[in-house]
Image: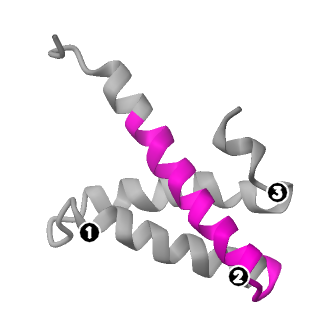
């Protein structure tokens, strides 16, 4: 079971959008790295609520899509890292 099992189809489109936004934030010199996941969390909830409506379930969907975006990015980074162990 993975995180995508918990996402509804309409919310999955937000994951690549957050990944792209995160990439742009990473290349912005005035945005510290620790702030990027928090920005993506806020944008994920905002995007989910905007797309699906204001309900507690849709807020959770926003949290899940932000988590999927950050997890996916970290899996990519950690897998490509050559200097580990």
Mark 1: few, some, or many residues within 10 Å (few <14, many ≥20)? few
Compare marks 1 and 2 and give the one earlier in the sequence.
Answer: 1
The relative height of residue 76 versus residue 28 in the rendered view (above or below) is: above
Q: Residue at x 32, y 27 (%)?
A: 78
Name the outermost residue toward the top. Answer: 85
The relative height of residue 59 versus residue 37 in the rendered view (above or below) is: below
Q: Residue at x 82, y 57 (%)?
A: 8
Residue 40 % position (x, y): 45, 67
Q: CA distance from mark 3 to mark 2?
A: 13 Å
Q: Which residue is mark 1?
A: 35
Q: Residue at x 16, y 10 (%)?
A: 85
* Range drawn in magenta: 52-74
Q: Which residue is mark 2?
A: 49
Residue 29 % position (x, y): 15, 65
Residue 63 % position (x, y): 57, 66
Tag 1 near tag 3, CB within 8 Å: no
The relative height of residue 34 versus residue 15 in the rendered view (above or below) is: below
Q: Which residue is mark 3?
A: 8
Q: Residue at x 84, y 54 (%)?
A: 9
Mark 2: few, some, or many residues within 10 Å (few <14, many ≥20)? many
């Amino acid at each position: 079971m993975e995180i995508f099992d918990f996402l509804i189809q309409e919310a999955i489109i937000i994951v690549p959008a957050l990944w792209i936004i995160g990439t742009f934030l990473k290349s912005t010199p005035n945005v510290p790295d620790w702030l990027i996941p928090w920005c993506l969390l806020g944008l994920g909830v905002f995007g989910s609520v905007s797309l699906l409506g204001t309900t507690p379930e849709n807020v959770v969907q926003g949290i899940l899509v932000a988590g999927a975006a950050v997890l996916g990015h970290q899996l990519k980074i950690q897998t490509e890292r050559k200097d580990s162990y």
